[in-house]
Image (spheres, grey):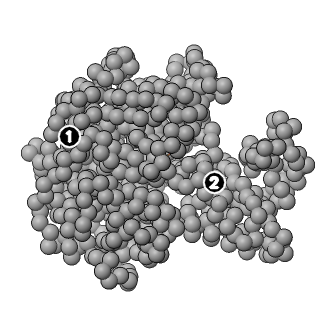
Amino acid sequence: MRNYLIEDLPHYFEEYKKSIKNPKKFWDKIADQNFVWYQRWSKVVKYDMNEAKITWFKNAKLNITKNCIDRHLAVRGEKTAIIWEPNDPKEEAQHISYNELYNRVNKTANVLREMGIEKGDRVCIYLPMIPELAVTMLACAKLGAVHSVIFAGFSASAVASRVNDCGAKMVITSDGSYRGNKVLDLKSIVDEALEKTPTVESVLVVKRTHNEIKMKEGRDHWLAELYEKASADFVTVIMDAEDPLFILYTSGSTGKPKGMLHTSAGYMVYTAYTFKNVFNYKENDIYWCTADIGWITGHSYILYGPLLNGATTVIFEGVPTYPEPDRFWEVIEKHKITQFYTAPTAIRSLAKESSEWVDKHDLSTLKVIGSVGEPINEEAWHWFNDHVGKKKCPVVDTWWQTETGGIMISPLPFVTPTKPTYATLPLPGIQPVLMDDKRNEITGNQVTGNLCIRFPWPGIARTIWGDHQRYKETYFSAFPGKYFTGDGALRDEVGYYRITGRVDDVIIVSGHNLGTAPIEDSINEHPAVAESAIVGYPHDIKGNALYGFVILKETGEGRDKENLKKEINQLIADQIGPIAKLDKIQFVSGLPKTRSGKIMRRILRKIAEGDFSNFGDISTLLNPEIVEEIKNERI
Ligand code: WT7
């Protein structure tokens, strides 16, 4: 592998300039020099930003697992690919070498094939953070099946809707999962979900907690039993550059979750390149990203990006505060972590604890520390920099999205001078533009606007599974010819970007991207509820928390309000997951609506924040008197 590491600031500017002037040449060289291909591409990039049709490395043949595993065997076969750190520190960590990973993936791919999985089939994976999660994803990729990982905190109905949306033929789960001192029964959630999923033919079950579970005759199989018998030889399936690699669901501002589709070649090239540069990865580093693999961060920067670079990557099963609030720091010390990548919400919750928890651990191996998922506030940035990085590790505040596949705007460590709360500069190949609401580009510096991207990059999602029209409308129609991110951003006097937050109806709670519509839909299903609206409000730890305004039906008026609140939250937990529960629920007699019937969320947001100073223009409201009522009864 050639070295595509950017060394210093002039080098960054040089690479950046090249990447904008001639993107084809730029990515052609990176793809050519750093990966193994069965066949070269006939065209680097082809795109139509109006129709949202994008291809990269057209007609190339490859398999990402050859690049993640096989090609490393000759040079680093005995090197640890994955360190698995269990929930309970008393349980022994596993060190899985590249050789061992190769074996496990081959055997698992054979199991999948024996169960009837073929190239193009969808497989949903609903597993905790255990090695089998990584292995089954890679086995899918090796066989050409499309994995769709569902975060193992989602409810049965959320699982069912995802399984049905992608028409999965198989679900992979476990008998349970450990999270801190809790044991969760994943299998019964899957059983409930699968009552309504006609396409699923088989379920593979990993043994983890040894919970008593029900196995459905003919449908459910213990993975370990099949694995024992499986051959360790597997002939890799050859994939086309644009063959689907995985589907990952993300919330939208309206309707059901969007199955973002990522394809093989572009995703591979982009995650590998960005991993290397954003984390300044060097051969003997030990890299740890604390995200769950159920989110894009885990796909790109626990699994694919690190393995593509032959790195050692940590998979952590537990939570930051178990058994004590120093678990992260203990793991860093224990495994001599060099790069540590986490989320603002985790940083804020740990900063709340006494700093002795951090200070008593030796974190001197750290070189780079990173943050992702939501804007990082100044206080959290400094705490992270002072206590974890000891002011000597660059903080990489990385901005990106499920849709972008990889990191888009971020400092490069030892290259880009950092600035608290700023994601700073775009990576090579990325052309951010700020647009005003009238669709004009805002030029110059010290400006704010809607963040768009001008030109495709290899990691961009290609479509929403089964709904290209929605893909086009959501990302390519607000600002024709450009990809619209849904975020607002500020560009400072030197051209650094700071992401200011969502400008649409998506709320980020503890780093989880939640759409208002699906939550409101769940609330409205309660028999006593007539209508509802939810907004986010600032929360010390979670970044944002959810505030619900609920109109009751007449039948609900006489009910005990505290019970109703509990029932509403239970409904949300059942349908979406506990992460989407509301912190505050206020019963109201009406919602502020425009003449066209649109809820004026801006006003609700202000009320939820407790800022009554300036509601802006409310002259278009049909029922301005309601604002006073809601304000006076604010919780
Ligand atoms: C949204 C995407 C991509 C990883 C995890 C989230 C917000 C993400 C940052 C950051 C400010 C950020 C944006 C974005 N976001 N990283 N460094 N600074 N905001 O993926 O669930 O697809 O959410 O997360 O609002 O649009 P996601």
Q: Image height check: is 403 above or below 56?
A: below
The label number, if any, that marks residue 52 in the structure image? none
Instruction: Find residue 11 and report its image quarter.
Output: top left
Q: Is residue 163 left or right of residue 569?
A: left
**What is the distance, in whole Å, between disc 2 and disc 1 at their CAs?**
40 Å
> Which corner quadrant holds the C terminus?
bottom right
Q: Residues within 10 Å of mark 2 (few under 14, many from 20)?
A: many
Q: Residue furthest left?
A: 74
Q: Image height check: is 368 above or below 526?
A: above
Q: Is residue 463 left or right of residue 584?
A: left
> Where does residue 237 sit, x and y in percent of width and height?
18, 51
> Where does residue 483 sit, x and y in percent of width and height?
50, 32
> Where does residue 184 sit, x and y in percent of width and height?
45, 73
Q: Residues within 10 Å of mark 1 (few under 14, many from 20)?
A: many
Element assignment for label 1: strand
Whether residue 40 can be seen here: yes
Residue marked by disc 1:
61
Instruction: Find residue 615 and report its image quarter.
Output: top right
Residue marked by disc 2:
517
Element assignment for label 2: helix
Whether residue 189 can be seen here: no
What's the amino acid at mark 1? Answer: Lys
Taking the spot 20% from the left edge, 73% from the top edge, the residue there is 226
Foreground pick, 224 / 419: 224
N-terminal-most mark, 2 or 1:
1
> Which corner quadrant holds the N terminus?
top left
Taking the spot 60% from the left edge, 50% from the top edge, the residue there is 254
